[in-house]
Structure formats: structure tokens, C-alpha cells
Image: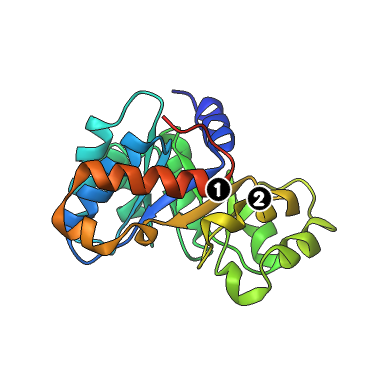
Amino acid sequence: MLIEQRLQHMFDARVVAIIRTKNADHALHMGRALLQAGFRCVEITMNTPEAVQLIETLAREAPAEAMIGAGTVMNAAEAMACIKAGAQFIVSPIAEAEIIRPCRDADVVVIPAGLTPTEIVHMWRAGAHVIKVFPIDAVGGPSYIRALRGPLPDIPLWVSGAVNPEETPSYLEAGVQLVGLNANHLPADLVAEGNLARLVEAARAMLRATGVAQIV
């Protein structure tokens, strides 16, 4: 898939499920359930145990219409390891320019963070495909995005940071292209049990709450 297709795929999906947990088995349960429920973009954060192996497993298992990515990527070495494992998008919580080149060389979507207008523009000019505005809940939520969109109407933005599924339409209306949702919205007891059937039901409810996607 070419970079333009990957970007359009993500923009069409509009929501990304973010897996961050201290247990690799729990992460795998969540990933499989989210994919079966219809999420088309799923991110594994690098501070999840065995993150690179999980990316490789989910990238191999994911349906053709789904993309697996890596989050909390802090440097170029981590980005390259994730790309080698099959990640199709790379996300950072910081304004780290060194992750940009290896991603662009591999036709992988690169999404560093930027909270201020200055950081956002610097990352965009450095070659980022999308800028992650993080942590959005701490700076005003949709109202902050609307304020950014005055001087910065065209830079693609992703928001994450304590975003509830039901808030998705408000962020999209404010002008973002992507909304990151923490997969910890899934019930912890079902995750621990590995009850896939019930986890898929819960993930479908999470997706339905966003109001933006067809449920499979």
C-alpha cells in the first residue's frame, strides 16, 4: 500500500484504537477483539511489554482492510524496529523529528506530536504526515482544536489523551482528521479472561459510541 493510500485509509477510518497495558497477553486479546469488531486502525504503544512482537503478530493476523501501528515511539531506532515488524504508521508523544526520515523512506505514515502552534508547524515542515495534538484533554479539548484551526487550517491533526468514544464527533467537527481512543475502555475483567466473544461485543459498542463507523 502506497503512502497516499495509507493516509487516506486512516482518514476514512477516523478513529484509532490505542493499546497500552502492562500485560502482553492482555494486549493481544484487545488487539484481536478490536480488529474483529471492525476497528481499521490499531496502535500498540512501545511501553506495552513485547510491543514489537505484538505488532508483528497483529500485522500478520489483521484483515487486509486494517492497519497496525506503533505508538509512544521515541527515536529512529524504535521506529525502524516497528517498521520491520510490520507497522504501517508510527506515532510519538513528543515532537521528535528523527522518526520522520525512516518512516518516509519506508512509505509508513509518521505522526509526531505537537501541542503548541510552533511545535505543530515545525513537525509539519520537517515532513510529518499528521501531527498528534497531545494531551488534548489538558488544554481545552475541541475548543483548543477550533482555536488552532484559525491560523492552521490545513495541517492534518490527530487528538488523543483521555478522549472518550462519545467525544469523537465533537473533535471531528472541530477539525481533526483522526481521534485516538484508549482500548482500556474495554472491560478489564473480559480482557483478563481473554473472553474473545464478549470482548468483540464490547469493542463493537466502543466503536458504535464514536458514531463514525460501520459495525461488522
Q: CA distance from mark 2 to mark 1?
A: 7 Å
- Sequence-wise, the earlier of marks 2 and 1 is 2
Q: Please determine whether, in this image, residue 77 is positioned above or below residue 200.
A: below
Q: Amino acid at mark 2?
A: Pro
Which residue appears at 50% of the width and 68% of the height? 162
Q: Which quadrant is home to the N terminus?
A: top left
Quadrant (top left/top right/bottom left/bottom right) for the C terminus: top left
* Vertical side of 63 occupied by 43: above or below: below
Residue at figure coordinates x 75%, y 66% from the top left: 143
Q: Position of residue 74 (x, y in %)?
A: 38, 62
Q: How many marks?
A: 2
From the top left corner, tell me how far across and down residue 163 is, in percent: 53, 63
Residue 36: give x, y in percent of width and height: 31, 35
**The quarter of the displayed image where residue 22 is located:** bottom left
**Label 2 sits on residue:** 169
- Residue shown at 23%/54% (left/top)? 27
Numbered label attached to residue 133: none
Q: By what rule are the colours in the image chosen?
A: rainbow
Residue type at tag 1: Thr
- Taking the image as shown, residue 205 lies to the left or right of residue 173, namely left
- Whether residue 179 appears in this view of the structure is yes
Q: Position of residue 205 (x, y in %)?
A: 43, 47
Above or below, 46 against 84 in this view is below
* Residue topped by disc 1: 210
Let me know if residue 72 appears in the view: no
Position of residue 178 relative to residue 86, above or below, is below
Which residue corresponds to the image point at 45% horizontal and 59% vertical from the top-left? 92
Q: Is residue 195 left or right of residue 47?
A: left
Judge left or right: residue 65 versus residue 156.
left
Q: Quadrant of residue 107?
A: top left
Could you say whether the residue bearing mark 2 is in a helix, strand or loop? helix
Q: Estimate how packed mark 2 is, as few (under 14), some (14 to 19) or many (20 or more) residues with alpha carbons within 10 Å.
A: some
